[in-house]
Image (cartoon, rainbow, N blue to C red):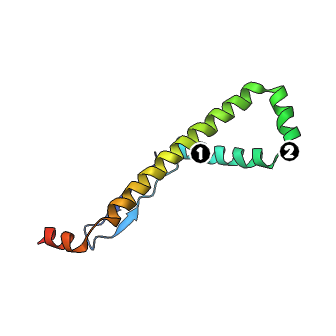
Amino acid sequence: MRHHRLTISQKGGQVRETEHMPGPDLIEAAQLRRLASTVLSKTPDDLAALAETNPMLIWEWIEAFRKERLAAEAEARYWSAAAAALSTANPETVRAAAE
C-alpha cells in the first residue's frame, strides 16, 4: 500500500507533502504502467507472437500486473475507510472533545 508523507508545520498548521526522490517501488510502478499501456496497444497477433517466443516473460508480466492490481485494490480500501471515517464525524462531537 502506498502512503503519502505529509508534514504539518508548527506555524499555522499547514499541511504539505514532503518532497523526496522516487524510490524503486515508484519507478517500478511507472514502468509497469508504461508496459501495460504498450500491451494494450498491441494487436492480438502481436501478443500471440510474443507469447510464442517468450511465454515465461508473459507470465512474469501477468504476475506483476496481478500484484499491482492487488496493491491498488488495497489502497482503494484504505482511502475508502479514511473517507468513511470522516463522513461519520459530527462537528458538535469534535467541538465538545476540544473543549
Estimate the x, y position of residue 94 in percent, counting from the top left: 20, 69
Q: Residues within 10 Å of mark 1 (few under 14, many from 20)?
A: some
Residue 62 is situated, as x and y percent measured from the top left of the image, at 67, 35
Mark 2 neighbour density, 10 Å: few (under 14) some (14–19) many (20 or more): few
Q: Is residue 72 above or below residue 84?
A: above
SS at circle 2: loop
Does residue 58 show up? yes
Number of the label disc, if any, that sits on residue 43: 2
Image position, residue 4 (x, y; %): 43, 55
Tag 1: amino acid = Ala
Q: Is residue 4 visible?
A: no
Q: Residue at x 28, y 66 (%)?
A: 89
Say which of 27 and 57 sits in front: 57
Q: Is residue 90 left or right of residue 29?
A: left
**Residue located beneath label 1 in the image:** 29
> Which residue type carries mark 2?
Thr
The number of callouts visible is 2
Identity of the residue furthest to the left in this view: 99
